[in-house]
Image: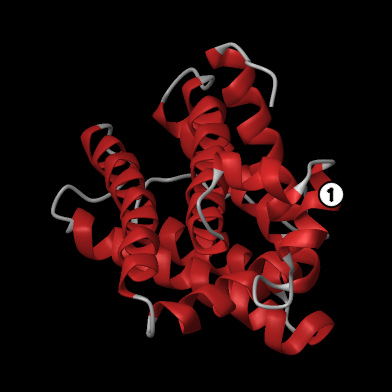
């Protein structure tokens, strides 16, 4: 391969990761072949293994890349808010957009496949656990900010509340996967907000009306 600059190598590596993610979302990572990834990334098998030692390594990198990209988008949305109340509204809007993304079914299906594989692959399990811990810590930080600004009760247990919110997010995604159109994703999230509004000064944001 021609010698590339470090930034060019990183850019090409990212292109391969994005191509692999596209393939995994389309077919699942067990059904996706390295040839399929190579075609999507427009690279030879030899070129692919120049960047990644195995398909398993690529799977792990795709998991981390997808989660970090989502967290970065969420971080930018929240940091653009003028205050905590607006940040919560922005976060809820981002969550709504995520849960109604046309590709959410494929994303949820890939998550389920990753979870199942994690029971057999400890390295993948550790990697996946670390990614979900990032989400949990981010939620804790949001809740702590809400408690500090009086939007959430000051005696709230931020870790327990973040754990519950994460479980609800996972449940909403898998519910949509299992029941399809019969599962009211937006309505469920709307009712959750009503419950929160009844317990705190956080102003109700109706998703169905938006």
Nearer to me, 131 or 189: 131
Nearer to me, 47 or 141: 47
Vertical arrangement, residue 192 with respect to residue 38, above or below: below
Residue 167, x across and y down, in percent: 41, 72
Name which residue lies at 70% across and 80% down.
177
> Which quadrant is home to the N terminus?
top right
- Most extreme residue toward the left is 155
Vertical arrangement, residue 95 with respect to residue 182, above or below: above
Q: Quadrant of residue 128?
A: bottom left
Vertical arrangement, residue 129 with respect to residue 95, above or below: below
- On screen, residue 143 versus residue 190, left or right, reads left
Vertical arrangement, residue 27 with respect to residue 181, above or below: above
Residue 152, x across and y down, in percent: 30, 48
- Most extreme residue toward the top is 5
Residue 92, x across and y down, in percent: 57, 47
**In this rendering, does residue 188 appear at all?**
no
Name which residue lies at 47% across and 22% down.
79
Q: Neighbour class for label 1 at 10 Å: few (<14), some, many (≥20)?
A: some
Nearer to me, 152 or 13: 13
Report helix, strand or loop for mark 1.
helix
- On screen, residue 202 versus residue 94, left or right, reads left
Q: Mark 1 points at which residue?
A: 40
Q: In which quarter of the image is residue 9?
A: top right
Q: How many marks can you see?
A: 1
Name which residue lies at 51% across and 33% down.
72
**In this rendering, does residue 62 appear at all?**
yes
């Amino acid at each position: 391969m021609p010698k590339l600059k470090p930034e060019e190598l990183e850019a090409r590596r990212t292109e391969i990761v994005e191509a692999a993610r596209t393939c995994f979302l389309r077919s699942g990572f067990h059904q996706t072949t390295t040839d399929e990834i190579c075609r999507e990334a427009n690279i030879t098998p030899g070129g692919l293994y120049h960047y990644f030692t195995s398909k398993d390594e690529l799977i792990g990198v795709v998991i981390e890349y997808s989660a970090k990209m989502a967290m970065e988008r969420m971080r930018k949305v929240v940091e653009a808010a003028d205050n905590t109340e607006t940040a919560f509204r922005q976060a809820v809007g981002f969550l709504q957009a995520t849960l109604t993304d046309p590709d959410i079914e494929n994303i949820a299906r890939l998550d389920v496949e990753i979870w199942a594989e994690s029971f057999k692959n400890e390295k993948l399990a550790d990697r996946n656990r670390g990614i979900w811990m990032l989400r949990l810590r981010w939620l804790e930080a949001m809740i702590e900010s809400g408690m500090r600004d009086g939007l959430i009760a000051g005696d709230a247990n931020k870790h327990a509340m973040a754990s519950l919110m994460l479980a609800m997010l996972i449940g909403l995604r898998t519910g949509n996967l299992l029941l399809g159109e019969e599962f009211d994703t937006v309505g469920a999230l709307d009712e959750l907000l009503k419950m929160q509004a009844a317990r705190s000064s956080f102003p109700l944001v109706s998703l169905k009306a938006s």
